[in-house]
Amino acid sequence: MAKKYLVVSDLHLCDIENNADGWKDYKSSRFVFDDEFEAMLSEFMSSASDGDSLVLVLNGDIFDFDLVSDLPENPPWKVSRNERKRGLQAGEDKSVWKLERMLADHSQFVGALARFLSAGHKIVYVLGNHDREFHFERVRRCFADELKKAASENGLSFSADQLSFEPWFYYEPGEIYAEHGQQFDYYNSWCYQLNPVVQVDGEEIIALPMGNLSNRYLMTGMGYFNPHSSDYILNLFRYMAHWFRYYAFSKRSLVFKWLMGSLLVMWRLLKNKKLMRLSEEGHIEAMQSLSDRSGISMVQLEKLGSLHRTPITNRVYRIMREFWIDRLAIALLMIGGTITLALVPIPLWIKLMVPLSSFPLLIFLYEYAARGESIFTVSEQLPEYARKVADTLPVKLVCFGHTHIPRLIPLEKGLVFVDTGAWAPVTDSRKPGQLAPGYRNYLLVMFDENGLKTEFGSRLEKQP
């Protein structure tokens, strides 16, 4: 008799979109993996012996609400001009529609989950940053209703307590701790993750962090980049090459989309920062409720919360730097300085040497001094965060997702850290259009009388 957990994260399911020119290729139907996910669940169920307990842990970013750009034909609510360009806001009614839209494109995935539940097993859904819209009760109910509908169509059923949602983490004392991990990443963390909403025109809206807003306001207009592969992190010369390859001879715009998207993200972040001050009380109440429900003391919860990073929203300069606004300002200043030098009555060699020598040196010194964290910093720090979690709660295995970097690291005797990788289409930069090896990861965990056993692997078929 054993207790078995299957942990996956970062599936990033969204609405399917096929474009002949490769625009938003990461949403293409050729990357859909519903059949492989169904096969994995079937194998997990068939591995069970009599008396075994099976739990599927969906450890965040299973659905990606930020990538849904489709709109209803006859919307029952107002759709703004910004939403028509970049997707619906993260309010409850619109989030329900987006979930229904995603589920319609992934009926096989829904059916696989329904059969798993109908076999008597449990599913725990831990919220990430891209599926934080499950914060809304109607969104959670919509998901449960679709699973029940899929089960009933096959003459099956399951009870409501077999499906649960965890807004922060899933914890089984002495065994496993699973958290998505965005709270350790200041690009994607919330000040009040248990109450991540603000009031806008009398409606509760998820106060999206910078990473989410960048997907909505930037990636929607820069569709030749893959948000799952981090291939949008380039230097100036590679950005120029990217523009020349994809935009120079097309009607699409890169520079305008980048500038407008960046300004929109910064404006939204600053607005959310002001509005989020009203969310603290609801967060404290949710913390107390979580403590009562889980049996974890408020002291322990506060200690876990102290590990989380303060959002980048509180650092305006870093936001400007992330969107290259600081480099744009410097470039404009240097252009202005060059023009000024050309107009003043000074020797020609000074007019030439200052722009050619002093300006590049200043840029180098500025870049050296302005270095800071990047989107890859969190992946370096997660193992240490896992160790600190285990210092607070007694567990043998700590698993995070979020980074899309699969790895298993024994931290010490009796403690293992796993980063559960991703199922999202992470593409190979050396082979455009092909998936990178090593993804579609799963973590199989078993606790029995012999202790802990783990299997960490990939369901990705060999690429041609």
Image: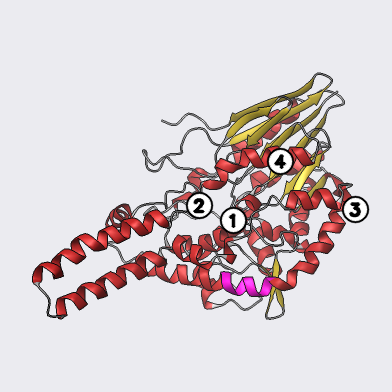
Residue type (three-letter) at the residue carrying disc 4: Lys
Label number found at residue 444? none
Mark 1, Cα crowd under 10 Å, few <14 / some 14-19 / many 20+, is many
Q: Residue 59, image x and y in percent?
A: 68, 44
Q: Which residue is mark 1?
A: 186
Of pointers 1 and 2, the one earlier in the residue sequence: 1
Q: Which residue is mark 2?
A: 373
Of pointers 1 and 3, the one earlier in the residue sequence: 1
Of pointers 4 and 1, the one earlier in the residue sequence: 1
> CA separation, marks 4 and 3?
23 Å
Q: Dot 3 lies on which element? A: helix
Q: Dot 2 lies on which element? A: loop
Circles 2 and 4: CB atoms closer than 8 Å: no
Q: Nearer the viewer, mark 2 or mark 3?
A: 2
Magenta part of the chain: 269-276
Residue 21, by quadrant, is bottom left
> CA separation, marks 2 and 3?
37 Å
Circles 4 and 3: CB atoms closer than 8 Å: no
Decide whether residue 239 is among the magenta residues: no
Of pointers 4 and 3, the one earlier in the residue sequence: 3
> CA separation, marks 4 and 1?
18 Å
- Decide if residue 76 is on the left or right side of residue 357: right
